[in-house]
Amino acid sequence: MSDPRAHARELARESIARGNVTSWFEQLYAESERDGFAISWVDLAPNPYLVDWLSRHPGLPGRALVVGCGYGDDAELLAGEGLEVVASDVAPTSIARCRGRFPDSSVRYEVADVLQPPAAWSAAFDFVFEAYTVQVLPGEARATCARSIGGFVATGGSLLVIARSRGDRDPEGLMPWPLTRAELDEFAVPGLALARLDEIVEPGDPPVPRFVAEFSRR
C-alpha cells in the first residue's frame, strides 16, 4: 500500500460518517493482517517516552492498564517491570495478534471500548498508559475518552499520556488531530491532577510537537 496513513484516514472518515467513531480500527487491523501492509503507528517496540518514564520511576508497584495496546509492546514492557498488566484494544484482531506474539505472557489482553469501559476498571489501576488514542477520535468522543481514561487511576496512582499537540489557534490538520492544552486537561477528572507536563518538539519535516503528561491521584 502506497500510503497506509492516508488509507487509515479514509477508513476513519467513512466510519465517522456512519456514526461509529471506532469501528475503523478493527477494519484497519484486519486488512493489515490479510494484506500484509504496515499500520503507520505500529513500531513493534515499546514507546520511547514510556521507556524513559519507567527509567525515572523504578520499582513501580501494582496493576497497570495499557489503553489502545496495538500489538502489545508497551504492555510487555510493563509486565517485565513486574506489574500485573491489563492491555486493551477495541479491535479484536489487534488483541488476537498480541496473544499470538506473546503466547506465554502474563499480560491479560482484552477487547474493550474505552468509550464504554468495563465497570470494574473504575479507579482500579496504579498506573495507566495512554498513547495516541484520544487524538484519533473526533468531536465529543475525545473528551469522553479522556475522562474515561482518567477515571481508571486508583488512589495513589499515575497516568502517563502521550499525544501530538497544537496551540489553541493552530489548525486541526488531518487525523490524527493533535490535542490542545484544554483537551489535555479533560484527563484531569476529580481527584486526578496534572503533576508534570513536557512539551516536546520532535525534529522532522515538519517537526512534530507532543505532550508528555503525567497525572497523579492522591
Image (cartoon, grey):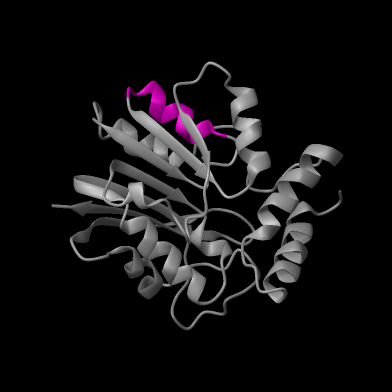
With 128 as the anchor, is 12 left or right in this view?
A: right
Residue 166 screen position, x and y as percent: 48, 71
Residue segment shown in magenta? 72-82
Name the residue rendered at 37%, 71% in the picture: 181
With 46 as the anchor, is 9 left or right in this view?
A: right
Residue 3 shown in magenta: no
Residue 36 in view in this figure: no
With 15 as the anchor, is 199 left or right in this view?
A: left
Q: Quadrant of residue 11?
A: bottom right
Q: Residue furthest top?
A: 104
Residue 136 screen position, x and y as percent: 58, 62
Name the residue rendered at 58%, 19% in the picture: 103
Q: Residue furthest bottom?
A: 169
Compared with 72, 14 (above or below) is below
Name the residue rendered at 46%, 33% in the picture: 75
Residue 146 in view in this figure: yes
Name the residue rendered at 56%, 60% in the picture: 207
With 113 as the anchor, is 26 left or right in this view?
A: right
Residue 120 screen position, x and y as percent: 34, 47
Name the chief secondary structure element in magenta. helix
Q: How many marks?
A: 0
Q: Quadrant of residue 98?
A: top right
Q: Nearer the viewer, residue 169 or 118?
A: 118
Compared with 34, 212 (above or below) is below
Q: Quadrant of residue 185?
A: bottom left
Q: Nearer the viewer, residue 110 or 153?
A: 110
